[in-house]
Amino acid sequence: MSSQDKFNDQLHFGIFLNNNLTKYWVDKTTKTNSFVLFARNLSITWGNDERYWKWTYEKETGGAYVEVAELLQVCWAEVKGKFNTNRLTPGTFYKVAFVVKFNDDASEWENLVNLKLDLPNGTQIQRKQNFKNKPKNQWIEILVAEFRVHEDEKQGEMEFSMTETSDFHWKKGIIINGVVI
């Protein structure tokens, strides 16, 4: 196997960047750039307060360990992130999705969760989703939005979020792995 073949295989398998805060790979079929921003690369309201969130490590495909955030209890759940669209492949249809797992103790997810994507061109995509009957103890993707990267369109930082801020509903039991793009 040539060194170029080995390099291509590594690109398809994925490369961990920024001390395992991000993973980058090239989709083998579409030849497009893809990313995961892991939980430590996101802004989690009260994320560093041990009363509300617990940080642990999970082994990712490829052998690297990444930090995940487990919600212990909070009434104001807010997770946000940013990503520069100039790192994406022009002409490609992308999705932005949170990668999460609900543990057996997950509760108070009856209210609708707000999911939002703001693109650099001013487009805002919003949707609401109920998390009440999501499967337990398995990683799932929660779709924020889908969009196309146009070559002639303004590039810059896109912002995405997942929020549920109902008063008196102390939510718990969601584990945040990251956001896949």
Image (cartoon, rainbow, N blue to C red):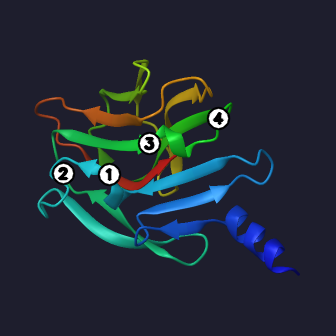
Is residue 78 left or right of 119 when viewed as pictured? Answer: left
Q: Quadrant of the N terminus?
A: bottom right
Q: First in sequence, mark 3 or 4: give its number.
A: 3
Q: Nearer the viewer, residue 92 or 180?
A: 92
Task: Identify the secondary structure beneath mark 2.
Answer: loop
Q: Position of residue 150 (x, y in %)?
A: 61, 26
Under mark 3, the amino acid is Asn
Is the residue 131 above or below the residue 111 in the image? below
Above or below for 30 versus 26: above
Q: How many residues crowd mark 3 within 10 Å: few (<14), some (14–19), many (20+)?
A: few
Question: Measured along the vertical axis of the image, is residue 143 above or below residue 7?
Answer: above
Of 4 and 94, nearer the camera is 4
Mark pair 2, 3: CA separation: 31 Å
Callout 4–callout 1 Cβ contact below 8 Å: no
Question: Which residue is labeled 3 in the image?
Answer: 84
Answer with mark 2 or mark 3, whichever residue precedes in sequence. Answer: 2
The answer for how far apart the CA atoms under marks 3 and 4 are is 13 Å
Q: Is residue 64 left or right of residue 48?
A: right
- Cβ–Cβ under 8 Å for marks 2 and 3: no
| Earlier-in-chain disc, 4 versus 1 | 1
Relative depth, front residue between 154 and 68:
154
> Which residue carries the number 4 mark?
90
CB under 8 Å between discs 1 and 3: no
Q: What x and y, as percent, mark residue 5?
A: 83, 72
| Residue at 26% in and 38% down | 108
Q: Give the image location of residue 159, x and y in percent.
A: 36, 35
Residue denoted by label 2: 73
Looking at the rendered image, the disc whose residue lies closer to the viewer, 2 or 4, is 4
Query: How many labels, in total?
Result: 4
Which residue lies under the disc numbered 1? 42
Q: CA distance from mark 2 to mark 4?
A: 40 Å
Q: Of 118 and 175, which appears nearest the observer?
A: 118
